[in-house]
Image: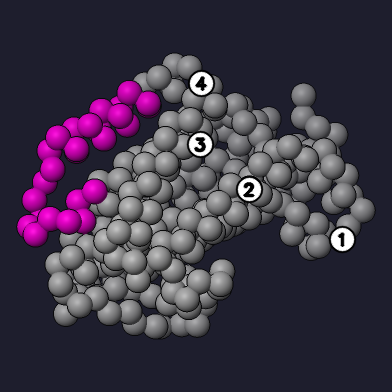
Amino acid sequence: MAPAADREGYWGSPTSTLEWCEENYAVSYYIAEFWNTVSNLIFILPPIYGAIQTYKDGLEKRYLAAYLCLTAVGMGSWCFHMTLKYEMQLLDELPMIYSCCVFVYCLYECFKYKNTVNYPLLFLLITYSFVVSIVYLNLKEPVFHQVMYGTLVSIIVLRSVYIVLWVYPWLRGLGYTSLTVFLMGFFLWNVDNIFCDKLRALREKMPPVVGAVTQFHAWWHILTGLGSYLHILLSLYTRTLFLKHRPKVKVRKQYFVSIGAPAAFECLVLGIYIGAN
């Protein structure tokens, strides 16, 4: 049964196995969770920009795939939160697994002189994606998906920490900024889940625009989208450094988030790309 604050909307009753703390159809009759939907723009626009620059610079196609996979996550999440339909939920959750597998492949292939295919690693990641997909489609248990996704994220974090501690220490600012932003999003995701009733009660007493700030699942999208985007930059930067291409950072627009790390000012959300000379 939907909470009292929820309303009926264009897409009908939810069929997804998950619903979040945002009140359904509170802002728009056509969008079930308005703020959780539009916050996915951070997953869509910056990665498209990164993919375009990666293609123009002739960089390795796996990084183009990484950007496009991140965009796919954002588009799937947009559809899920807009409709709260089970089929759209799968478009959100399964690409999270696939994109992380691409991130793992990119990160573990940074230190090769030639752009060859690591078939054993590729086979392992494809098998992992396939098994997780089949089990999840049959099990329909969100916790299973979260554990499998968390496993991949842990592998990415451990590899990233290794790179910034022992290989390229001057990338610590970028690496730690990416990790910090992602962890902040994870923290707010938990707050949204644990204190949902209190957050909903608080929103009833606040103006709609002010109440939107308490939509912490939307903040999870914004922060994890930014953290993932910065991670791709870290992976790409590591690769071009190893190839001695003397990577350069070009600033296009002044949109940045400072977390206190020196490299944060280089990591502009929409205004950074890494080229190779």
Q: Amino acid at mark 4?
A: Lys
Q: Work out whether residue 32 can be spotted.
A: no
Instruction: Say whether residue 203 is left or right of residue 67.
Output: right
In this rendering, the label closer to the viewer, 3 or 1: 1
First in sequence: mark 3 vs mark 1: 3
Please state the horizontal and vertical placement of residue 151, each as a whole percent of the image: 42, 35
- Residue 111 within the segment the image draws in magenta: yes
Reading the image, the residue beneath label 3 is: 88
Q: Residues within 10 Å of mark 2 (few under 14, many from 20)?
A: few
Q: Residue at image x 43%, y 31%?
A: 148
Q: Amino acid at mark 3?
A: Met
Residue 183 sits above or below residue 126 on the image: below
The N terminus sits in image quarter: top right
Q: Amino acid at mark 2?
A: Phe
Reading the image, the residue beneath label 1 is: 207
Instruction: Say whether residue 156 is left or right of residue 216.
Output: left
When asked about the image quadrant of residue 61, the answer is bottom left
Q: CA distance from mark 3 to mark 4?
A: 14 Å
The C terminus sits in image quarter: bottom left
Reading the image, the residue beneath label 2 is: 187
Q: Residue at image x 82%, y 38%?
A: 197
Q: Amino acid at mark 1?
A: Pro
